[in-house]
Image: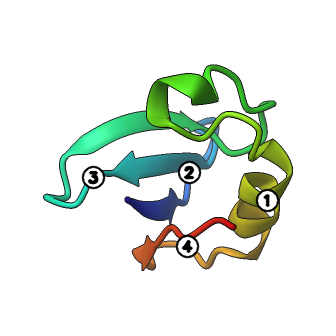
């Protein structure tokens, strides 16, 4: 799974995209909102680690999502 942080403009907020191994979009959510429904993506119980990854992401840089 891959993750990318997309910079918003003006009134459009920043967003996070989760993409599968084929780079198909599987999730799209606001970066400033609490993480919900992570069980849909196989990430349940990893909210803290995912929040830390999101905080450290640079805008526009696709990176492999590897959570312990």
Q: Is residue 65 above or below residue 10?
A: below
Per the image, the residue denoted by label 3 is 20
Real-space CA distance between mark 4 and mark 2, rounded to the nearest whole angstrom? 10 Å
Q: Quadrant of the N terminus?
A: bottom left
Disc with the residue nearer the chain's start (4 vs 2): 2
Please provide percent x and percent y for residue 13: 64, 41
Labelled pair 1, 2 in contact (Cβ < 8 Å)? no
Please provide percent x and percent y for residue 34: 81, 30
The residue lying toward the viewer, choosing from 63 and 45, is 45
Disc with the residue nearer the chain's start (1 vs 2): 2
Horizontal side of 31 relative to 17 (left or right) equals: right
Q: Which quadrant of the structure image shows residue 58?
A: bottom right
Labelled pair 2, 3 in contact (Cβ < 8 Å)? no
Q: Nearer the viewer, mark 2 or mark 3?
A: 3
Real-space CA distance between mark 4 and mark 1, rounded to the nearest whole angstrom? 18 Å
Disc with the residue nearer the chain's start (4 vs 3): 3
């Amino acid at each position: 799974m891959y993750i990318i942080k997309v910079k918003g403009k003006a009134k459009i907020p920043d967003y996070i995209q989760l993409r599968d191994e084929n780079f198909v979009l599987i999730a799209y959510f606001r970066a400033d909102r609490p993480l919900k429904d992570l069980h849909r993506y196989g990430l349940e119980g990893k909210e803290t680690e995912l929040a830390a990854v999101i905080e450290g992401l640079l805008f526009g840089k696709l990176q492999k999502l590897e959570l312990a």
